[in-house]
């Protein structure tokens, strides 16, 4: 309810934003999180922290972090996720002045109904980790309203139009991206068709809808949208109205944006804004870039300061870094019910940090996360020469491959030589070229760029047609497209990446 006080949510100056955020944080922790979350009730008591004492970022830094490890149960134990769900205590609520007042004004029944609306879990999404147990995240009706609100803001920041036809190509699943987009359509009061991605209708089904609906905006995962547009272009489909492409679910290098614009031109569309979003299960919302011209640096992800508080920390020391400095992204919601995590370490690193200056493009004074986002788990330890492990940052490689002219799609495969767990690691690059011929030139270019970025060279480059690569990616069916696939036998513990030992992967 506090968000109603933020009438000018996107036009406050930096000082007012921070002041309002910490005021809201204090109230939120005091009224909802500490009394109703088993985990945080215990944590705050153990550390002797009172929500009332949290006035500044420095005060907040005394609250211990939460990480994925806290949410996942060790083998054989009960999952701890329930401890993170806000479960209201009737005895506490009964004594609150706001409750007493509402009972007098509206009656007991209406007050009970309001609490159910606010706290009762009615929807669940889940994380999509391949390596770890999926973690469920619960939403109450109140959270769904916030999902609509963040969805409407996504549409506004991306400069969409309620008259547009929106096509949601995210895979249908209990996964934030699909539902964020579904509720964005409802929140923005606009036409949206959700195809369910390749899983439900296949690439062909999506191409058919593209030709029939002639959408103004496409929303989905970059590689899947790329495949749909590519097949549409092959089939000579007409889609002349595309003006916006909004991407989520994976990183979006500049090269991918360029390729998508080129395909839209083939389908008869004019100028197209391609925007990335940053979202994750635990935030229960996603944050967009605003539109900028092709070739202009990304303005960063526009954050919603009344719905959540971001910090950027040094991943080694845990100390918050200064404005605009790189580090790990830490999240605290300011208005969530259902599952709630406080000072949650996302494992995502942002190269140019958190900034509070007005956006140079849209002028909004929202805080922004600027630069490239990369995941700790994308830095992997390879035993190239049997002697020592080499840390390879696959984030860098992805940007290199997407930015290389002549590559349509690609996949990096890590494997063991001869499939022998004790042998060296090998890197195979699978490529579907965007044009015929030029294979030798392309192979050379890939090798040169690899060596420049990582000092290692791929063992092989293998060429495939687009269809084979679509299958390799699990395009449209997997929740995360498999751009880097680790096919090393699991028995060799030494070579399996261990993110907890790694330092900041953005410095390479
Ligand atoms: Zn902007």
Image: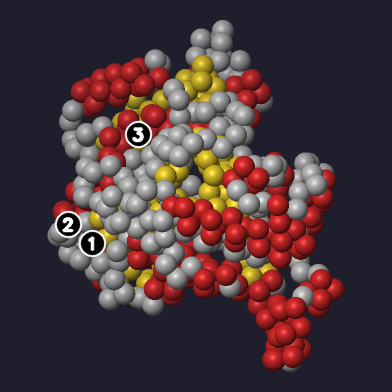
Q: Quadrant of the N terminus?
A: bottom right
Q: Going 33% across and 68% down the picture, which residue do you hit?
A: 166
Q: Residues within 10 Å of mark 2 (few under 14, many from 20)?
A: some
Q: Which mark is residue 243?
A: 1
The residue tagged 3 is 399
* Residue nearest the observer in this picture, 472 or 347: 347
Residue 424 vertical position relative to residue 188 in the rendered view, above or below? above
| Circle 2: element type | loop
Give the residue furthest to the right.
Answer: 91
How far apart are the alpha carbons under marks 1 and 2?
A: 6 Å
Q: Going 53% across and 59% down the picture, which residue do you hit?
A: 20
Q: Quadrant of the C terminus?
A: top left
Decide which of tag 1 and tag 2 comes sooner along the chain. 1
Decide which of tag 3 and tag 1 comes sooner along the chain. 1
Q: Is mark 2 within 8 Å of ligand 1?
A: no
State the image coordinates of residue 191 (x, y, percent, origin top left).
Answer: 35, 75
Task: Count the numbered circles shown.
Answer: 3
How far apart are the alpha carbons under marks 3 and 1?
A: 25 Å
Query: Which image quarter: residue 445?
Result: top left
State the image coordinates of residue 39 (x, y, percent, origin top left).
Answer: 77, 52
Query: Which image quarter: residue 140?
Result: bottom right
Decide which of tag 3 and tag 2 comes sooner along the chain. 2
State the image coordinates of residue 208 (x, y, percent, origin top left).
Answer: 29, 66
* Residue nearest the observer in this picture, 15 or 253: 15
State the image coordinates of residue 409 (x, y, percent, origin top left).
Answer: 32, 39
How far apart are the alpha carbons under marks 3 and 2?
A: 24 Å
Residue 480 vertical position relative to residue 349 in the rendered view, above or below? below
The residue tagged 2 is 271
């Amino acid at each position: 309810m506090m968000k109603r006080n933020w009438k000018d949510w996107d036009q406050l100056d930096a000082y007012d934003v921070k002041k309002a955020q910490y005021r809201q944080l204090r109230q939120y922790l005091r009224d909802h999180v500490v009394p109703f979350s088993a985990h945080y009730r215990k944590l705050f008591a153990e550390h002797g922290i009172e929500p009332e004492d949290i006035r500044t970022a420095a005060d907040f830094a005394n609250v211990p972090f939460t990480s994925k490890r806290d949410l996942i149960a060790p083998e054989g134990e009960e999952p701890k996720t329930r401890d993170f769900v806000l479960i209201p205590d009737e005895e506490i609520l009964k004594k609150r002045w706001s409750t007493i007042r509402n009972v007098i004004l509206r009656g007991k029944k209406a007050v009970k109904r309001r609490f159910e609306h606010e706290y009762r879990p009615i929807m669940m999404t889940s994380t999509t980790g391949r390596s770890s147990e999926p973690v469920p995240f619960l939403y109450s009706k109140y959270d769904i309203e916030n999902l609509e609100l963040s969805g409407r803001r996504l549409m506004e920041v991306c400069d969409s139009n309620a008259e547009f036809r929106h096509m949601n190509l995210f895979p249908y699943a209990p996964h934030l991206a699909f539902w964020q987009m579904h509720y964005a359509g409802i929140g923005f009061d606009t036409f949206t068709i959700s195809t369910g991605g390749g899983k439900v209708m296949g690439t062909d089904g999506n191409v058919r809808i593209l030709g029939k609906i002639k959408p103004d905006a496409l929303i989905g995962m970059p590689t899947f949208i790329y495949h749909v547009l590519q097949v549409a272009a092959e089939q000579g489909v007409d889609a002349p109205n595309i003006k916006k492409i909004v991407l989520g679910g994976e990183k979006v290098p500049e090269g991918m944006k360029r390729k998508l614009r080129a395909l839209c031109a083939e389908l008869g569309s004019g100028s197209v804004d391609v925007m990335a979003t940053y979202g994750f299960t635990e935030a229960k919302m996603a944050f967009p870039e605003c539109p900028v011209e092709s070739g202009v640096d990304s303005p960063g992800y526009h954050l919603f300061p009344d719905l959540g508080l971001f910090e950027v920390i040094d991943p080694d020391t845990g100390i918050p870094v200064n404005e605009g400095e790189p580090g790990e992204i830490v999240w605290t919601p300011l208005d969530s019910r259902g599952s709630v995590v406080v000072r949650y370490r996302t494992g995502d690193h942002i190269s140019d940090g958190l900034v509070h200056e007005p956006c140079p493009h849209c002028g909004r004074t929202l805080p922004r996360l600027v630069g490239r986002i990369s995941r700790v788990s994308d830095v992997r330890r390879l035993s190239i020469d049997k002697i020592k492990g080499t840390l390879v940052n696959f984030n860098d490689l992805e940007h290199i491959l997407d930015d290389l002219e002549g590559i349509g799609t690609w996949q990096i495969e890590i494997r063991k030589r001869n499939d022998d767990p004790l042998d060296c690691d090998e890197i195979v690059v699978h490529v579907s070229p965007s044009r015929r011929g030029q294979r030798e030139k392309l192979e050379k270019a890939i090798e040169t760029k690899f060596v420049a970025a990582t000092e290692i060279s791929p063992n092989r480059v293998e060429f495939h047609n687009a269809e084979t690569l679509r299958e390799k990616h699990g395009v449209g069916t997997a929740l995360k497209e498999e751009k880097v696939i680790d096919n090393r036998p699991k028995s060799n513990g030494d070579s399996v990446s261990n993110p907890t030992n790694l330092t900041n992967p953005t410095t390479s």
